[in-house]
Amino acid sequence: MSESERIELPKNYFPSDDEPFMNDRQKEYFRRKLMAWKEEILRESRSTISNLQEDMGSLPDLADRASTETDRSLELRARDRQRKLISKIDSALRRIEEDNYGYCEETGEPISLARLDARPVATLSLEAQERHERKERVHRDE
C-alpha cells in the first residue's frame, strides 16, 4: 500500500474485537504504532552516538573513568538490543504489507488485539508463546 493509499483513522481510534480482524484500519493502526516506535528508537540511537562521540575530557580519577566506561558499555548493550528490536519491527511491517500480520506463526490463529497492542512485534499467540517458554524452561533445566 503506497503512502497515498493509507487509511485515515478516526481520532482516538483503537482496534476492537467488534470489527473484522486485521481489517485495513487495524493494519494501519499497527503500522503507525510500529513506525512511531521505530522512529523513537532511531532518535534515541542518534542521541547515544552523539553522546559517545563527545570528548570525555581528561578524567584524572580512575573511579570516574571506570564509571564512565561502565555507563558506555551498558548504553552500547542497550543499543544492540534496540538494533535487534528494529529488525523485529521491520519484520512486523513486512507482515502487515503481506497481509499476514496478527496471526500466530505456530497455529495460524489470530493473536489477540490486546497482545498486539502491548507487543506489536508478537509473532505467537499468548498460548503458543507460553508453550514455547515452558519448552525452553524444560530444556534449560536439563
Image: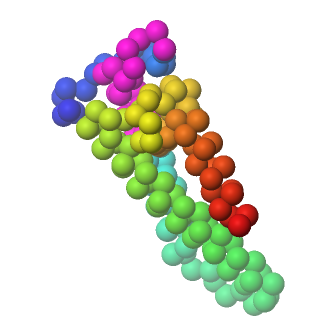
Residue closer to the observer: 19 or 129: 129
Q: Is residue 34 left or right of residue 68?
A: left
At horizontal 78% and vertical 89% (from top left) the residue drawn is 62
Overall secondary structure of the magenta section: helix
Q: Position of residue 60 (x, y in %)?
A: 75, 90
Residue 95, above or below 61: above
Where residue 102 sits, quadrant-wise, is top left
Where residue 52 sits, quadrant-wise, is bottom right
At horizontal 54% and vertical 61% (from top left) the residue drawn is 81
Q: Is residue 37 visible?
A: yes
Q: Which quadrant is the N terminus positioned in?
A: top left
Q: Which quadrant is the C terminus positioned in?
A: bottom right
Q: Which residues are magenta?
A: 17-36
Where residue 54 sits, quadrant-wise, is bottom right
What scheme was used to colour the molecule?
rainbow
Residue 134, above or below 57: above
Q: Is residue 51 left or right of residue 95?
A: right
